[in-house]
Every structure is written in structure tokens, then in C-alpha cells.
Amino acid sequence: MENSTQFTSFMLAGYSDSGHLKYFYLIILTVLYISIVFANIVLIMVICMERSLHEPMYLFLCSLFVNELYGSTALFPALMIHLVSDAHSVSTVYCYLQIFCIYTYGSMEFCNLAVMSYDRYLAICYPLQYNVVMTPNRVCFLICVIWLYPFAKSIITLSLTIRLKLCGNVIDKVYCDNYLLVKLACSTSDTTVNNIYGLYSLVLSVVVPLITILFSYIKILTICLKSSIETRQKAFSTCTPHLASLLNFSFGCFLNLLQSRFDRPMRNVPTVLHTILSVYFLMCQPLLNPIMYGVRMTKIRQACKYILPVGLYPKT
């Protein structure tokens, strides 16, 4: 067995020497992060301030926008600091905290999208019973589940990782990743519980929400095929942003999974592209969602025009 050491920090090996280009990358990241924070905060404020948007669909959207702020903040500040720094090490406490935040963000995103698809299923397939089923108490309960379940699951994931004895402290990414951290364990027998729980967690956090979403959209499609053109158009306008968000996030998670678990397919990928692909789900999703929902959904667009100062919201 290799000698284990109690590390106080981890080295992030995903960064490369980009010379003066690092300042150009810093400007891009800064603009992107400011845009994400601004867009999500604006829509959260609009939904909170406009009483006509105090409906289940928009409350779930508000939860989604808060999660985008949460996930992007777990990555961007540290990424920008390390980009211009010569030292790419992080303390063990911060590394575990970042793992917790990123994993809860991903799980909450899928749970939120699943609840939103269920909400659209009820609204389109059972419009007369919708208000009876989707009561304010039910909405509050679902939002609590969206947030509390991923937190509880990630605490278990993190506690299983912290107990491991590590024989290395180099993580081949620009942020801390739980799977790569587990791979640093001195003994593979110690990671058996981590791998079993990781598979269980993956099923509950990804597979179950995706099945819920698939079921909801099969039912919605079935109803739309039997309905009028007006009903189809209304369903299409409310479901398109959700589907775009789901496909984008699933694609980003797939890229991240491919990089973490399968080294061979990514060996010939340039370093910069490799880094972009690894953070795609944390960069593009938080910006895509407010743009998609802010532009595509009429009630949000109209509310923005009434609430925001003249000239701040673009005319359409």
C-alpha cells in the first residue's frame, strides 16, 4: 500500500500557462459572470414584485434562477482568481465546500426541471383540476424538496469522501471534483461504498428526474396531437424553453461525465477546449435559462417591460 498523507491542500492541474491570454480569458469570464448575476437577479426580482407571476410555474422558475446564481458562484470567483494566479492550490476545506456546492447545484437543476415538467403536464393535461392539485402548500412542499433533498444527498456524498485516506493531492481539473478526489484514495477497497452510493445517487438525481420529464412530455404530446392548433401553440410556447434548458444541461453533464470517467476520448482535445467542456454546464446553463425564459415567455417579458426602467429591457 502506498504511504498516505494528511493533505492540507489540493493542486488543481487543469490550469495551463496561457501567457498574456489569461487576461483576455479573465475579461471574458468577468463579463459572463456579471451577465449571469444580473440576468438571474433581474428575473427573480420581477417574479417577486409582479403579483400576476405568483403562480406555480413562475415560482418554480424563481427557484431555478436562484439555483443558477448558486451554481455559478461556486465556480466563477475561484476560477477567475486561479486564472491569473501562479499558484493553483486550494485548501481541503474549500475543495470539499466547492464539491458540495457543485453537486447540489447539479442535483437541484434536474429536480427543478422535473418538477417544472410535472407542473406543465398538470396544466396542459388536467387544466380544470390544476388549481386543486397545485395548491400554494403543494408548491411550497415541492420547492422544499427541490432544495432539501440535494443538500441531504450531497452531505452523505461528502462525508463518504472525507473519510478516505488519500495518497495524492493533484486533481486534473480547474475545480474540485468528487470522483477525481475519490480516485486519489490509497486503497480501492475503501472506495467501494463511495462507488455504490455514487451509482445510487446518480439514479435518484438524474435517471428518476429524466423519467419524470419523459413521462410528462409523452402525455403532453399525446394531448397536443388531439387538441386544437391554438392549444398546441400555447403548449409549445411554454414547453420550448424547458426542453432547451433540459437538453443543454444534460449535454453539459454528459461532457463532464465523459471527461471525469473516460480519459482516452479526451486525450487529443486541446487544453483550452478541454477546460471549456469541463465547465460548460456551470457556465452556459446559468446564462441560457434567464435569456430563454425572459424572451420566450410572454408574461415575464411583459412584466419586465412594466417593472424595469425604460431602456433596460430590450423591445421585441
Image (spheres, grey):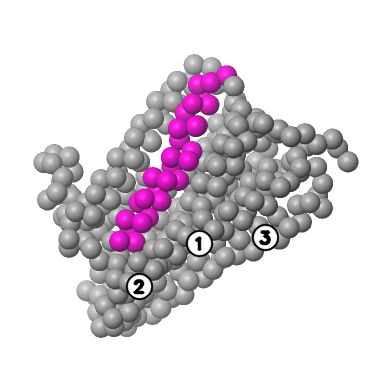
**Most distant residue in the top direction:** 20
Residue pointed to by mark 3: 197
| Mark 3: few/some/many CA within 10 Å (<14, 14-19, 20+) | some
Q: Nearer the viewer, mark 3 or mark 1?
A: 1
Label 2 packing within 10 angstroms: few (<14), some (14-19), many (20+): few
Q: Which mark is residue 138?
A: 2
Q: Residues within 10 Å of mark 1 (few under 14, many from 20)?
A: some
Badge 2 amino acid: Arg
Q: Amino acid at mark 1?
A: Tyr
- The percent position of residue 266, horizontal first and vertical second, equals 65, 41
Report helix, strand or loop for mark 2.
helix
**Residue in the foreground of this view, choosing between 225 and 274:** 274
Distance from disc 2 to disc 1, alpha carbons, whole Å, reads 16 Å
Which of the marked residues, 2 or 1, is nearer the chain's N terminus? Answer: 2
Instruction: Tell me the amino acid under the disc marked 3.
Output: Tyr
- Residue position marked by numbered label 1 in the rendering: 149
- Residue 254 position within the rendered picture, expressed as x and y whole percent measured from the top left: 57, 52
Q: Is residue 253 above or below residue 236?
A: above
Q: Position of residue 53 (x, y in %)?
A: 21, 61
The kind of secondary structure element at disc 3 is helix
